[in-house]
Image (tube, rainbow, N blue to C red):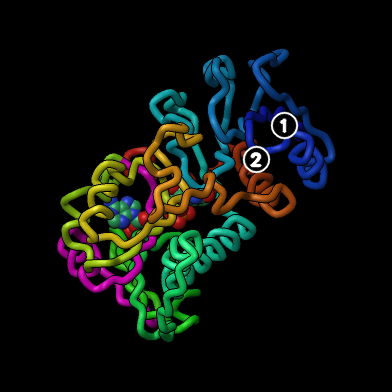
Amino acid sequence: MKPHIYFNSHLDSPDEWRAALATQFDDFEFSVGEEVAAPETVDVAIVWMLPDGGLERFVNLRAILSLGAGINQLDPARLPAHVPLARLVDVSLTRMMVDYARLAVYRHHRKFHLFEQRSRERCWIYMPPTLTTATTVGILGLGELGAEIAVSLRHEGFNVFGWSRTPKQLEGVATSTGRDGLIEMLKLCDIVVNVLPLTAQTRHILGRDVFAHFKRGACLVNMGRGPHVVDADLLDAIDAGIIEAATLDVFTVEPLPEAHPFWNHPKVLVTAHAAGTSLPATAVVTIAGNIRRAMAGQRLSQQVDMARGY
Ligand SMILES: NC(=O)c1ccc[n+]([C@@H]2O[C@H](COP(=O)([O-])OP(=O)(O)OC[C@H]3O[C@@H](n4cnc5c(N)ncnc54)[C@H](OP(=O)(O)O)[C@@H]3O)[C@@H](O)[C@H]2O)c1
């Protein structure tokens, strides 16, 4: 087997990926960028985003492998509908996402968002710390990432609630589904962490109607996708004191435009879509497994259900 692998990402290093793939395949062809000789021989596309020319010229493509856990950045409507698409689940990504969630949750639990503001004002205000058992965290999305985050926070002693599309059982985590389940959960949460995939059902889920049910003074962590949040509604909810502060990693437009009111907002921390990434050294095992499946005509691992949207 000598797969022809096409690679496209402005975030990931093709050289590192080529080297990682060389640990898995004795022989393979590797093409990068817009110019590809003999595009009809490409078997598998490994991509973060689509190249400008799309993937249509790879007429014999057997699989599209996302370099992200999410797939919306690939603009699914532009993908060849007959080619299976898989998202990436990887231990290094999961570890980093759990770390980010813990860091952001502790930032709010220990009121660092307030200390950050006060320190700039040279203002010494004592805010007594509390135990993790006094803080309730709600996780939106209990998939590969959300479930790990929920369990990790539970181990830290937080009260943890989780919300998903279908019922889930996680030890020590109170779970719910449906709109009513979401609202009941939000009323209780001091910190809400979003780690949903972006689908037609979840786009703009964090808007005015839902913020109205947040516990007053709650904090929001968005590490899912930018369009989950209606930006203007979040700013209004912050102004109204419904939301005390936010830690945001993802945005509707990335990079976040210079004029956006999130920048420099005293109650918003912006991180640059840096919550987690997949390292080639670990992720190549999953990717290589899917290349072998694609070459053998088998169903991909973590194959996306296009009707469901994730
Ligand atoms: N910021 C970053 O750097 C970064 C990095 C990686 C990933 N992400 C984001 O994290 C997302 C989640 O990744 P994952 O691997 O955990 O995905 P996943 O395993 O597919 O899990 C998705 C979870 O969301 C739930 N869900 C989906 N639609 C829902 C709906 N309409 N209502 C309620 N719950 C719904 C699913 O419910 P079921 O369990 O019932 O299916 C599942 O629990 C990605 O799609 C991506 O957007 C961000």
Q: Quadrant of the N terminus?
A: top right
- Please, is residue 232 above or below residue 212 in the view? above
Residue 129 in the image: state x and y as whole percent: 44, 83
Specify the quadrant of the image occupied by residue 244: bottom left
Real-space Cα distance between discs 2 and 1? 8 Å
Q: Is mark 2 within 8 Å of ligand 1?
A: no
Question: What is the magenta range?
Answer: 172-199
How many numbered marks are there? 2
Q: In what element is the residue under mark 2?
A: helix
Residue 215 in the image: state x and y as whole percent: 22, 68
Q: Nearer the viewer, residue 231 or 149?
A: 231
Q: Which mark is residue 264?
A: none
- Asked whether the beta carbons under mark 2 and mark 1 sit within 8 Å of each other, the answer is yes
Q: Which residue is mark 1?
A: 3
Q: Name the amino acid, label 2.
A: Ile
Q: Quadrant of the C terminus?
A: top left
Q: Is mark 1 within 8 Å of ligand 1?
A: no
Residue 209 in the image: state x and y as whole percent: 16, 51
Q: Residue at x 55, y 18 (%)?
A: 52
Q: Residues within 10 Å of mark 1 (few under 14, many from 20)?
A: some
First in sequence: mark 2 vs mark 1 = 1
Q: Name the amino acid, label 1.
A: Pro
Residue 286 in the image: state x and y as whole percent: 64, 50
Q: Is residue 243 visible?
A: yes
Q: Residue at x 42, y 41 (%)?
A: 251
Q: Which residue is mark 2?
A: 291
- Please, is residue 128 above or below residue 218 in the view? below
